[in-house]
Amino acid sequence: MAYTEEELKKELETKEYEYGFYTDIESETFPVGLNEDIVVAISKKKEEPEWMTQWRLEAYRVWKEMEEPEWANVQYSKPDFQAISYYSAPNSKPKYDSLDEVDPELLDTFKRLGISLDEQKKLAGVAVDIVMDSVSVATTFKKTLAEKGIIFCSISEAIKEHPELVKKYIGSIVPQKDNFYAALNSAVFSDGSFCYIPKGVRCPMELSTYFRINQAGTGQFERTLVIADEGSYVSYLEGCTAPSRDENQLHAAVVELIALDDAEIKYSTVQNWFPGGKDGVGGVFNFVTKRGLCEKNAKISWTQVETGSAVTWKYPSCVLKGDNSIGEFYSIAVTNNYQQADTGTKMIHLGKNTRSTIISKGISAGKSQNSYRGLVQVNSRAKNARNFSQCDSLLMGNDCGAHTFPYIEVKNKTAQIEHEATTSKIGEDQIFYCNQRGIDTEKAIALIVNGFSKEVLNKLPMEFAVEAQKLLEISLEGSVG
Amino acid sequence: MDLKDKLISSFMAFENNVDIDSAVHDERSDAIKNFEEKGFPSKKEEAWKYTSLKSLQKIDFSIFPKEANALDYKDVKRYFINEIDTYKIVFVDGIYSSFLSETTHDGVDICLMSSALTKPMYKQVIDVYFNKIASKDESLTTLNTAFSREGAYIYIPKSKMPKKPIEIVHFSTGNEASLLLQPRNLIIVEENAELQVIERHQSLTENEVLTNSVTEIFAAKNAIVDYYKVQNDLSTASLIDNTYVNQKDDSVVNVHTFSFGGKLTRNNLNFYQNGEHIDSIMKGVTILGEKQHVDHHTLVHHIQPNCESHQDYKGIYGENATGVFNGKIIVDKIAQKTNAFQQNNNILVSDKATINTKPQLEIFADDVKCSHGCTIGQLDDDALFYLQTRGIPKKEARALMMYAFANNVLESVRIPELKTRINKLIAKKLGVNLGFDL
């Protein structure tokens, strides 16, 4: 055996964040602080129409009156919202026609991240709309998509070019006053992705965006809006890495999905932001609001692999409004060292014959705290609603914690709800069995964790499944208790 | 004047009435301070998210009961488990009724809280146990502590077992338009001792009653305690029951809660496992109709290693009833090898009934087996059809299936006469006569 447990633990603790580097690109950054002027300035900067500016201001005024929520099972020193700069865009930003024109340093960054654009273009067949500090700088495969009538662009572009769609849907699922961070995002969101799939179109490729937080002291507030028109299908991927930094960075995104009649949206996330050092210093605060609306016969499926961020606070939800609609949530949340995650989902059953499935796998190691918090609500008119929930937690070492807070509220007698949760550790006998078959402890753990999370990994698109598996291994190897 | 202010201003008068020189005086004063600060819990608090006390606070409850109505045994006989001989501690409108009770000091102490709090011979025990595990923070518990004066006091010395089960019964006769009762029970079971208790709250008229009860149970090494709560009150009676159980090594405590009635019932059941190889068992059957509301709030705190806890709550909700189950299991870091199980199954039989459930796990140790399961569903149509093909009418078939659903919990009732009684209550509640006992 190559390692003893001690050595492994040591190596893991000292393992520097793999993607921790900082790209030296001159950014145009606003003065720190937040007031109405800044909100207006952001809006002006992005050449937004008047209605958008007003919409942002409305959100800002609501936000000012709100208090930061404290109910989540996480502890952190609250960010100072007046010490954050709310806008930063990479400076060298003409519209590129080809990759050659892009700042080589920027390209190098992507290469180190493992998302070499040209390679991806050729091999993966994935259209990547890269958000580098809030402003999208490269979009590929736009043409192929345009032929099908699919709109896939940055949200600021969409506001300018498809105002009717944006105006109709933005804030329709996550209203400005929904919660503290959603309100903040609505006021200051700098960029994000917009996607519209026309009626009856099946999007031929996985749409994908990579987000990065780059500029020191910059919060990133993306806004994503995905609209699948009647009978359409789209699979959307979102993946994240961030450079290593000591001060806490705030990330408050809003994602809205709209699946009209018979449409299907599959939204997958791999989140690997800087989790903070092994002593709990630094790391990203990830406070995200994600919600989807299902009309008749529509389906929304959330899949997430959460390995990064110092504090995560995220509940991708489905509002099952239409009859026969389906909501799914598959999640793996891994926490190590001093990471804290409070994540889960909400399934709101409003229509008849609605179905939802929740599979949540939590893995805690080191001194981390991992919570599942979920709500299954069946309205009095939601006849024959069906829900199945399963939350499993795996504990590694005795300094970590696993928590479950499932809320189940049912007002209809025809509902069928099942919920089960288990907490356990990797069995010594399981490891022993692997050992005696010649598999060393480290590999055995990887094997068992992989098996534990298989149900969720299987739901990921190919491109992500590989990356996710790798991430799980990096985050966990050697943490056996 | 709202209820909170009334209670606080009555505290002085209350204190003057009881012995202010006793050690308990300080406990009372601290408790009323805490209540004054916190007031009644509101729906904004996570623990009270699904249960509102607002409407109860609007009622002008009288806090000090006047003279008790004398009750004839034959009028209230049916509320006792009269098939067997029991010790009885009976209160009528909060006042001890020596006429209806049967207490003892023969080897064990089965008597009154009021005498335990005032007589010097009990002082040592009171100093060690009184208000030691009851929360000093939770507002309704501290409200009870502030006004603690009467209730049951049970002390079972080492290796003793009372000859017969004990019944604690609270009657309210309705000689007040609305009455607030705050019984306070203290139960101490020493090493190797055993105890069985049946507790019941019963209104005899339709006048409004609110009971805010606190029970502290201490189970020493190897002790065995069976506690049965029968809640089948009129629809004008509300009950907030706060029970705190402290367990030492190898002890076994069973608490069964049968909720079939009442307007609003809230059961706060808290277990603290201060030893190893402990078993804590919580079981409940809830069958509700009308506009009844029952909220089961359980907490098991696994503080030491190698312990077990088992929870099994079944609920059947009809008409406009609301059911809440909130079960919390905390496993401390050192509590390795803990086995904690929690099960909550519910059947909704009406479109207007609601069930809110929140089974919660907070686990800080890694070598544990903890699981919880929760289901909400209906009776299986195929099974119902099968029974009908065998000549069992639909109504009876449904009742039979509901019996089967609740039977797991009934099986572990260790007093046969009580089991029969519960069976009858269930049959009555379901409106059928099966002609046999399960």
Image (cartoon, helix red, strand yellow):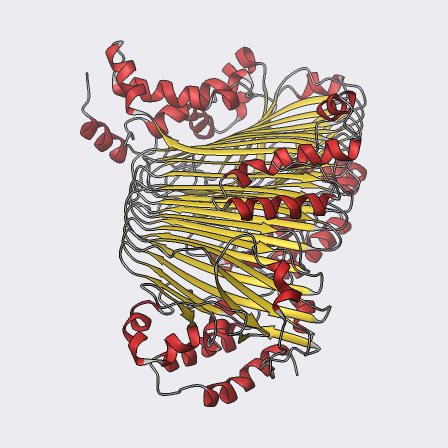
Observer-nearest of A282 and B174: B174
Q: Is residue A380 left or right of residue A328?
A: right
Q: Pick the quarter of the image with the N terminus of chain A.
A: top left
**Where A115 sits versus A136, above or below?**
above
Q: Position of residue A158 (x, y in %)?
A: 72, 36
**Where B316 sits versus A240, above or below?**
below
Query: Is residue B148 among the parts visible in the rendering?
Result: yes
- Residue at 60% of width from left, 38% of height from top? B406
Observer-nearest of A277 and A426: A426
- Residue at 64% of width from left, 56% of height from top? B232
The image quadrant that residue A324 belongs to is top right
Tally the marks: 0
Query: Is residue A252 among the parts visible in the rendering?
Result: no
Q: Is residue B91 left or right of residue A57?
A: left
Q: Position of residue B108 (x, y in %)?
A: 34, 63
- Residue at 39% of width from left, 87% of height from top? B20
Q: Position of residue B107 (x, y in %)?
A: 31, 63
Q: Is residue A148 left or right of residue B419?
A: right
The image quadrant that residue A25 belongs to is top left
**Where B348 sits versus A128, above or below?**
below
The image quadrant that residue A205 belongs to is top right
- Which residue appears farthest toward the top when viewing the image? A437
Observer-nearest of A184 and B202: B202
Q: Pick the quarter of the image with the C terminus of chain A.
A: top left
Q: Position of residue A294 (x, y in %)?
A: 74, 33
